[in-house]
Amino acid sequence: METPAGDPQASACRLVGWKADDGGRVQLELSDDAGSGARAEVSIANDGTVRLRAGRSLPLPFETHLGREPWKTTPAVARARDGSGIELAWEGPLGCATVEIEAAPFAVRILDRGGREQASLTGLRCTPDGGARLAWAARPGERLFGFGERNGGLDKRGEKLLFRNRDVHLRVGGSRYLSIPFVLGVVPGDAAGAARGLLLDALGPVEIDAAATRPDTILLETRSDGIDVAFFPGPTPADVARRFTARVGRTPLPPLWALGHHQSRWSYGTASQVRKIAGELRRRRIPTDAIHLDIDYMDGFRVFTWNEKRFPDPKGLLAELEAQGLRTVTIIDPGVKRDESFPVYREGHQRGFFCQKDDGEEFALRVWPGDAALPDFNREDVRTWWGELHRPLIEAGVAGVWNDMNEPAGWRNDLRVGKLPLILRGQDTGELVQSDPREPDRDVPHETVRNVYGLQECRATREFLESARPGVRPFVLTRSGAPGIQRHAAVWTGDNASRWSHLRESIPMLLNLSVSGVPFCGADIGGFSGSCTPELYARWIQLGALYPFSRTHSMVTSRRQEPWSFGPRVEAIARRALELRMRLMPYLYGLFREAEDTGAPVWRPLYWEFPDAPDCAGVEDQLMLGPSLLVAPVVHRGARQREVVLPPGRWLAWDDDAEYVGPRKLRVDAPLERLPLFLRAGALVPSRSPVLHAGEQPAEPCILEVAPGADGAADWIDGDGETTAYREGALARAPLRLRHRAGGRLRLELARREGDLALPRRPMRVVVRGCEAPDAVFLDGRNLAKGGRSPGFTFDQGRVHVIFEDTGQGHVLELEPAP
Ligand code: MIG
């Protein structure tokens, strides 16, 4: 008899046998009411992450076949419990877990050190077609974040979510380009054990019912390959992130130029247009590091070609751009034009590299070049081949690759509306087959591995770039992806529109993507389709200049969207916004380095930094840029003020150092020129004077912004902007500490730089904001003179500026207040 879908009480399976192997894995034999068997396996990793896999037959693990680290099981000891069931326990320096496996009904309960229940997994059912279902108990008051890239609000509790990669084009709810079935559960205000995470790991589409059908239950459902879940204990979101990203991977430090602003349009379609854009960017002094070339640089949309009429000398053009500090990123779609005279197609076809239909015919997708064949990226030989095809591009000087349409997306017919094909969604891929990444000789329905199509493409691209330019940090940008995509590519959120609602929505979308393991993400600034208004562009660039990935992009039919397209006032706003990004580059660099080290995202929801503050949990129109900066952008048309939820603690307004004490709500003025931004007391933000691009020397390379009012600590991270030498230690780390002493004395320590990177002595400016004129300032015990000479200090509008030469050997600054 069928049990009602998702009834967690339904005794779907019971344990009929078990054994523990030497590796600490517990193999379980299960049987359901109908007498059908199922197999499961439970294991614990050394950081306390617990994995449960189950299916009619035990699913084959796939992580190493996606290029991830193998799952490392600890030799946890399993023993039979009194009565029935099994207990499995592990405790180590990185984490611990106790797993209780109950026999009938089969249930897996995960407990923490104190014996408190962390997770309860019940109601396992394995269907004959290979799918499976599992229920995970939601906690009272628990908010459910993460879920990768989704429309809508921050908290998804009460929603049913399908994860199947698809080209959504504009705004539709439901699944999108990229699927990360990861849940971060947070109980606001509950400091102990507040955060926990779970990944429903899969190659194909899955569903999560986020307590929609049953208010106390999260239902996890797959369609093929059994079920594979990993549970990540907290207690903080950062703990969950560290464990989750240890499993799926982290973003390697991007090249510095990729952290700058990118200017894109569909399309800058001729060499002279590109030159003109570059010229304007420089003439108008708009900080920008990259120009993107969309599909029209190609010859008839044939990948890896150039249209020779429109781009007669790519190498010359790209060298010209680079001399102006502008890198070039070219789009690459997976679809290869089926044209016998096109060498890429001919070779791929002859070598059998393209996906087929189940009848053995080559599959053809209607997409830009007409009929196109799809490489089967699940095969290593195909990935190597595909990677190698990029060689002429990088020899021409292409710096980064933009992977679009890799869900994969296409359409049935090109019905033309004006000059544009009307894209009919839902190309039927029902008959498409691909290699199983685990067993390349075996064909499986594309649907069962669909969600990793884009990831495998990006992996091919990145691995090639790494091997072709050894020691150079690659840049790959993608639309589609799956858990772990952050190891290979930055993610942009696809086609949005020039609407205020899409500006607003980009915040929860990017925050949830960020906590889903993808720190390097952004939305098209100004909106992709539709025509942006001057005011919308101004507000969007103010926020977008602080997106972790910052790119202006627009559609072929929309009004032009360069920073100067909206008149001088908005141009000045854009310049200022991008200058702020350039100022904050040392801070951003440190945040990206931290993301690679710990998995903590660059953009953080308020609850991440303030888990004890219930009022912060649901805030979705503000964010933390790292631990120190609160961003409260204006996202409503006509608004010249906004309400800010100020988290607990003291805060300094970025522009005028006005001091506020949270938690409180605050109304702030936000004329069109202003982005409300706050420094957290205790913040130590490494910055510099703005430059036009990563390669330019700043007038002042080191400016430390200090927000007094609380003690604080941070690291100043320095390294080169291009190479992977930092992995061998060529990175400088200077620990910073701020202390408030009795009598209002401030003490700032810049510890001696650590690491193998030899840095020259350099001028340093420390800016202590929001203070009274000091009586005296001491540098390394020496009383500094007042005045603009180094070493010395000045006092101006509530800020103390101390300038001196940073030797890297460590310095102590002391500010003595007036009596
Ligand atoms: O069918 O390459 O999301 O950024 O400009 C549209 C043209 C194909 C979709 C991408 C968009 C890009 C556009 N592409």
Image (cartoon, rainbow, N blue to C red):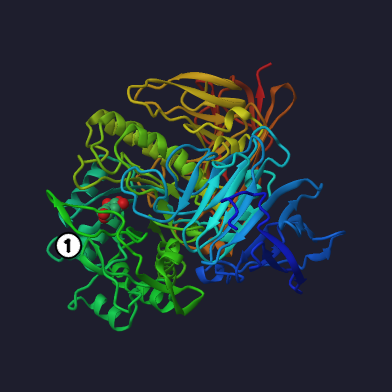
Query: Which residue sits at x=58%, y=30%?
Result: 616
* Residue type of the residue flagged with mark 1: Phe
Query: Which residue sits at x=44%, y=38%?
Result: 152
Q: Nearer the viewer, residue 515 or 265?
A: 515
Q: Residue furthest top?
A: 819
Can residue 756 be seen by looking at this rendering?
no
Q: Is residue 243 above or below residue 37?
A: above
Q: Is residue 351 left or right of residue 754?
A: left
Q: Residues within 10 Å of mark 1 (few under 14, many from 20)?
A: many
In percent of width and height, residue 757 lies at 56, 58
In percent of width and height, residue 545 lies at 39, 39
Identify the residue position indicated by label 1 in the image.
Answer: 311
Please identify the quarter of the rendering in which residue 37 is found: bottom right
Q: Nearer the viewer, residue 558 or 308?
A: 558
Q: Residue furthest front?
A: 1
Can residue 462 be seen by looking at this rendering?
yes
In percent of width and height, residue 416 lies at 14, 53
In percent of width and height, residue 465 lies at 40, 68
Callout 1 secondary element: loop
Q: Is residue 173 above or below residue 373?
A: above
Q: Is residue 796 left or right of residue 533?
A: right
- How many marks overall? 1
Q: Residue furthest bottom?
A: 350
Picture quarter with the N terminus: bottom right
Q: Nearer the viewer, residue 220 or 436?
A: 220
Query: Which residue sits at x=69%, y=16%?
Result: 819
